[in-house]
Each structure stands twice: as C-alpha cells, then as structure tokens.
Image (cartoon, helix red, strand yellow):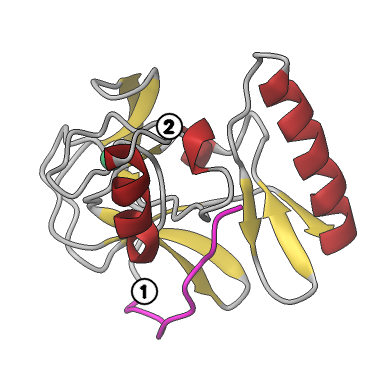
Amino acid sequence: MSRVKKIKTPRLKTPSDVRLGRSGVHGYGLFARDFIAQGARIIEYVGDRITKAEAERREAQRLARLAAGADGCVYIFVLNKRHDIDGNLSWNLARRINHSCHPNCEAQNIRGHIWIVALRDIAPDEELNFDYGFGYSEWQKHPCGCGAAQCAGYIINSAQRWRVRRAVAAGRT
Ligand SMILES: [Zn+2]
C-alpha cells in the first residue's frame, strides 16, 4: 500500500495534458504532451473511496492474484485514517503512471484528493513517474527496472532502500 505525504497545498493550476504511451520501463505509461512546470497538479488519482476494512479485503484479493501469477499491481492509496482510495478503475488514467526511484512527480494529498504533482519541470514527451514508496514487508515481490542510480532493484520507499541493498548483497532475493 502506498503512503501519501501530506504537504502544503501548491498553487492551483489547470491539470496539464497527458497521453498514454509505450513505456521504456514497464508496459504502458503516462507522458507529458507539453511542458509541465514544477509544482503543477497534473492529474488526480481517482478511485473508489473505501474503508480500511474494505481495503484490507481487497489487498488480500490482490495478494491472492499475485500468488496465482496474475496482475498484482497495487492501486490502493492511503487517503486518511478512515479511508483509502482504490484506483483500479479503467477511467483512472493516473493508475498508468509507472514507479521510479528517482521520480519527476509525487502523489500529494490535497484536501482529501490525491494529486500527481510535478516535482520539477517536465519536458514534452517525458514519461511521468512517482515513487510508489512500498513498505519493506514484500519488497521481493516488486522488482524495479527504472534504471535510476538510486535504484536498489526493487520498489521500496527511499528510507528503507539501504535494507533492501543489504539483503540483495547478502543474496536474500
Ligand atoms: Zn528503481
């Protein structure tokens, strides 16, 4: 489950234009159509607002799918203490955004809505990505091929990357 940082609301901007395209990293990805300025809200991560209990139920289903070799992608975001957002919906274009260990965007919780916000200026045709920030418990299940210098080879929140590097170096993959 991804954690979303709560930070100050950035200046309001019209959502920038994005397009779906073949990713060099993983399947399809989302790309900037035009220049996107640092701090811009690019797209809202929409989905079902669900309770923590329902999120746990869906997470168990996801793990079962993953164990069966099917799609085990994580689409559930922590929204607040009571609710999560399940973005596994066809109209949630933001679910196509790939992970990077050195991302150009981040997910921000802005007044109860999850927005993908530009961390820096983004050039036209650049692929958008953010750090999924997964926890340590299942890091082996999420290999990463983002190619960033920071990458530990697995999708893991940056604070625990050193633990994964140590585990990989010790051959515990
Ligand atoms: Zn990576």
Numbered badge on residue 12: 1
Q: Say which residue appears at 64% left-offset and 63% top-offset.
A: 78
Q: Quadrant of residue 42?
A: bottom left
Q: Which residues are magenta?
A: 1-11
Name the element at disc 1.
loop
Mark 2 Cα shell of 10 Å, populated few (<14), some (14-19), many (≥20): few
Q: Quadrant of the C terminus?
A: top left
Q: Say which residue appears at 87% left-offset and 52% top-offset.
A: 54
x then y, percent, for residue 100: 29, 43
Say if 103 sits above or below 27 in the image: below
x then y, percent, for residue 144: 34, 33
Q: Is residue 148 magenta?
A: no
- Comparing 164 with 56, the one in front is 164
The reply, left or right, for residue 96 in relation to residue 161 is right
Q: Which residue position is annotated with label 2? A: 173
Cα separation between marks 1 and 2: 43 Å
Q: Amino acid at mark 1?
A: Leu
Confirm whether residue 106 shows in the render.
no
Q: Are marks 1 and 2 in contact (CB under 8 Å)?
A: no
Q: Say which residue appears at 61% left-offset and 52% top-offset.
A: 1
Q: Say which residue appears at 65% left-offset and 14% top-offset.
A: 69
Mark 1 or mark 2: whose residue is earlier in sequence: 1
Residue lying at the far front in this picture: please name it: 170
Mark 1 Cα shell of 10 Å, populated few (<14), some (14-19), many (≥20): few
The reply, left or right, for residue 115 in relation to residue 16 is right
